Image: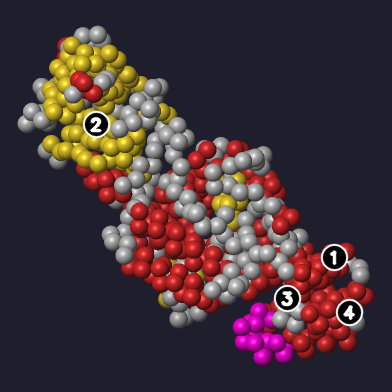
Amino acid sequence: MDNFTDFNNVQVRALPRHLKQFIVHQHYGHYTPVDQAVWRYVMRQNYSYLKDVAYYPYIPGLQKAGLTIERIPDMQEVNDALGKIGWGAVTVDGFIPPAAFMEYQAYRVLVIAADIRQLNHIEYTPAPDIIHESAGHAPIIADKDYHDYLSYFGSIGAKAMFSAQDFELYEAIRQLSILKEMPDADPQTLAAAEQHLAHCQKNMGEPSEMALLSRLHWWTVEYGLIGTLDHPKIYGAGLLSSIGESASCMRPEVKKLPYTIDAVNYTYDITQTQPHLFVTPDFQNLITVLEQFANTMSFRRGGAYGLQKAIDSKNTCTAVYSSGLQVSGTFTAFEQYQGEVSFLKTTGPTALAVNNKQLAEQGKTRHPDGFSSPAGRLKGWNKALEDFSEADLNTAGIVNNSNAVLEFESGITVTGTVQLIASQDKIQLITFTGCTVTDAAGQLLFDPAWGVYDMAVGERIASVYCGAADKDAFEEVVLQSATQTYHPQYSQQTRQLHNLYRQVRNCREDHSGYAALGNVWRALQANHQEDWLCALEMLEIIDHEEQQPELAQEIRLFLQHKAAAQPEYYKLIEDGLYLIAHPVEQQLIM
């Protein structure tokens, strides 16, 4: 990103270039006084309720993450706090692709949406926002067992195969979440987006590894419960950041299920409250289940299974030979001999790497049209070519600047002049000139006229995963959405409302100016009768400071009438009035 800031945080500074492309500036000054009031209301309600049902003590968790109930967090302060436990945080524009999200976790960096929900979505928003990401994820990150799980999940997820349908679904979810956050969204456009999302969900085909992992992520990181089925505690960020669902999820009609690998079979709807939730006895169980699923994935199975998944994904993938050589490109074909991969092929730009670092002169410019190579043992040898000693190479006739004939057990034959034998502990690459490659039937696989031939060395394909081995060298640009999040344009009347919220906030923070609250109240009544939160904040100040009892009674009656007349505000106002009568203890407000 332009003018990238690392927040003076080790984890953020270590992010590779392909992840930095998603980072946006927080622009703290863009948060309005209404935004600050929304944050404060949600956080006060969260503490009031979550102190009894959240797994990790909520206030200590907030402090360790650099958060406060009183104001929206500044990312520098968050990074200063998270850096002490080996984590960092960055701000992004709403949803980012799942593969990138997972990789951030692997680097121990929290991804936090810069925007905050609108007042009319104060209880819950389907769009990622700073309340969900920071107030949901960050407080529990101080728990070592949990943040180890989160990071490990990211490292597994970063290797997951994903499909074109996955990206289409991501785009549909992102588009719908943005529309739902817009106060003036066209109903027809909204309905069309909902129909499109439903269509995507119904036409996913066989779910990819990423789709299945996303379910495990949803039922743990986002909506997880921990403890016993009868007395669970909340640790999922989606619940911790939702003042509505954090309460409703504990009702008996929300079925509580034990968290096992079976959770991978349960889909979810991001726009709806969840009909069931999964309970883990401890965080170690989360890792156990993740390991069970990881053992089914291509990056651990490799071989023909992994290459077929790579071909099906139609994305840039990496095949890792048993020698450690990594081939990154779009895989289009492979052959087998006795159940093992004997030959593989990519189409389009391809690069070769070892230990996730591209080999010198083995990038996409050398292999712009694709790459192909055999795999397996040479005929007549009881050891793999990658393990040959110098004496073995001489015996086999594989010597620099000499002609060589390599006959593989599969019947593939490579004939040419050896130019280079590259190795790092194991032999990984042999470069030929004047090279001809044929299969067992004599079909030509490589012609000398095509140029220099780089032959990958390895007995088997040990691993296959999505993405390039050296993403920065490969110049991999992860698929990004063209849809931008909603940023409201404020009318003069709305800016006047912001100023009233600002006056109330200044009064509370400065412990002065109480006499001006009467004028604020009259302005609200004259021009902003739809508002309830500013009135609630005024009542809190007047009631606690025992100022202007007549004004306090007038505001209270207004709020009670609005709660009775407008059911959508009833719980919000009643919960706010409850906190005025039963205030959060001052020392916990920080």
Q: Nearer the viewer, mark 4 or mark 2?
A: 2
Estimate how packed mark 1 is, as few (under 14), some (14 to 19) or many (20 or more) residues with alpha carbons within 10 Å.
some
Q: Are marks 2 and 3 in contact (CB under 8 Å)?
A: no
| Residue for badge 3 | 533
Q: Amino acid at mark 1?
A: Asn
In the image, what residue type sits under mark 3?
A: Leu
Give the quarter of the image for residue 556.
Answer: bottom right
Q: Which quadrant holds residue 5? A: top right
Label 4's element?
Answer: helix
Query: Which residues lie in the magenta part?
Result: 560-573
Q: Which mark is residue 372?
A: 2
Q: Residues within 10 Å of mark 4 (few under 14, many from 20)?
A: some
Disc 1 designates what residue? Answer: 506
User: Who comes first in sequence, dot 4 or dot 2?
Assistant: 2
- What distance separates the C-alpha of mark 2 from that of mark 3? 65 Å
Identify residue for label 4. 518
Nearer to the camera, 194 or 325: 194
Residue at 44% x, 48% y: name it: 479
Question: Which residue type carries mark 2?
Answer: Ser
In which quadrant is the N terminus drawn? top right
Q: Earlier in the sequence, mark 2 or mark 3?
A: 2
Q: Is 458 placed left or right of 242 in the picture?
A: left
